[in-house]
Structures are given as C-alpha cells and as structure tokens.
Image (cartoon, rainbow, N blue to C red):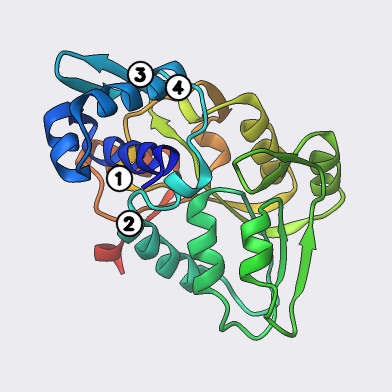
Amino acid sequence: MLAAERRNIILERIQEEKKVIVSELSRDYEVSEETIRRDLEKLEEEGHVVKSYGGAVLNEASVMELPHNVRRRVNTVAKQRIAELVNREINENDHIFLDASTTSVYIARAIKQKEHLTVITNSIENLLELSLVTGWDIISTGGLLKPGTMSLYGWKTAETLGAYHADKVFMSCKGLSMERGITDGNDETAGIKQAMIAAAEKVYLTADHSKFDKTAFSQICGFNRIDTVITDSEPEPTWKEYFMGQGIGLIYPESI
C-alpha cells in the first residue's frame, strides 16, 4: 500500500471514529509505529488531525476540505438513506440544483429512474453519474476546477446558477447549529450554495445525523432560508421542536 493511500484510509477512519491509536493502526496496516507516526504528522501538517499521546484526534476546527475520495466513503449508509428520501421529493419534469457534496452523488444515483428531469450542477461526479441517462437535460455550471474536490467553483459558476430558476435545490452542509445556522467549510462552497438558494423555489437541506450541533467556518444561510430538512435518522426532540417552530419540514426514514 502506498503511503498516500494509507493516509487517506487513516483519514477516513478518523472521520468516522474521531480518534485513532498508533499501535492499532500499526497492527491493522502491518507497518511500523514510526511509519504511522509519520503519517499522522503529515495529516497534522495538512490540518486534518491533532496529534495526541499515542495517536491523534480529528481536528474539528479545521476549515480544510477533506479529499473527495475520503468524504465519499464517510457515512455511506446515511447518505444512501437520504438519497432514497430525496427521490420521493422529486417529480417528473422538475428542474433541480444539485450541489457538489458527496451526498448529492448518491442522490444522482437514486433518481436515475425518473423519466425526465433538468439537473443543474457544479459537480463533475454528478455529471459522470448522469452521463448515460437519456431524455434528461443535464447542465454543467462551468467554472474553475477545485483540485481534489471533483467540483467547479468561482464567479462563472455563480453567474451560471443565477441564469436559471429551479423548482428545488438539494444541498448539504458541514454543520447545523441553532445559534449559527447552516455552515460549510469555506467561503467558496458556501457562496455557491447561496447562489443556488437564491435561484430556487424550494430549498432542501440534506444533512446526516453527524452534522447536527456542529458549526463550520463559513455560514451558508439562516434557517429562515430552509424549507425542508432531510436526514437519515430521527433528530433529538429539541431539534424537532426547533424545526417546527421555524416552519421547516422534517423528513427522516421513520417519518415516512
């Protein structure tokens, strides 16, 4: 296994478990503890983890984007559940925005049996996922390719989004906080989602259970801009009450 591949696997693991132990990683990946320490040092330099005695913990304060191939494999079951629920919310002939989140790739996969849709997206992976679908209108925003993200950003992307009016937008986030609203990892991603919100009739927030009570670096919007939240499991009662008070719809598997 190449060092870069091993570090990505470690990063995926620490995303799920929030911490890792050097001795366990050494055993699981059959390399020396010194090699694992070097891996963790590299991940710390990149801002993803904070080294601790005998291991490392996830750097919750990091504003850096994880590599796309790592994010795609985190909470996959949750993303699949959300995608199945989103599929129920999309009607034939809808015009929809899909953001460049890894959740949206699962959504693109789930909706391919629809007869006709118009999909506008800044996700290269969504474009590839839908490239063989016939009878649809698939529109790429264009823009600047952001390395490691499989997505397009910049003023051209926002300009393209502003030229359309969509029935619905399905977007993800890095965190939901009652105090801070809906947040994402950086200004670029937040800005593109703001452009989608401005050009859509109805706004769906797709967020798995791990995003609740979290705050990331850049605010996307307040809850007053969200129409419906779709998540993978029943939220805490305080969140259910909050959404009801805000007039926000809530969809999760047990609610169907």
* Residue located at (75% from left, 84% from top): 135
- Between the C-alphas of marks 4 and 3, the distance is 32 Å
* Residue located at (83% from left, 54% from top): 164
Q: Which of 201 and 244 is in front in this view?
A: 201
Are the two marked residues, 1 and 2, in contact with CB atoms closer than 8 angstroms? Answer: yes
Badge 2 amino acid: Ala
Badge 3 amino acid: Glu
Q: Residues within 10 Å of mark 3 (few under 14, many from 20)?
A: some
Q: Earlier in the sequence, mark 3 or mark 2?
A: 3
Q: Which of marks 4 and 1 is nearer the N terminus?
A: 4
Badge 1 amino acid: His
Which residue position is annotated with label 4? 180
Which circle marks residue 41 in the picture?
A: 3
Tell me the mark number nearer the camera, choosing from 2 and 4.
2
* Residue located at (30% from left, 45% from top): 209
Q: How crowded is mark 2: few (under 14 residues within 10 Å), some or many (20 or more)?
A: some
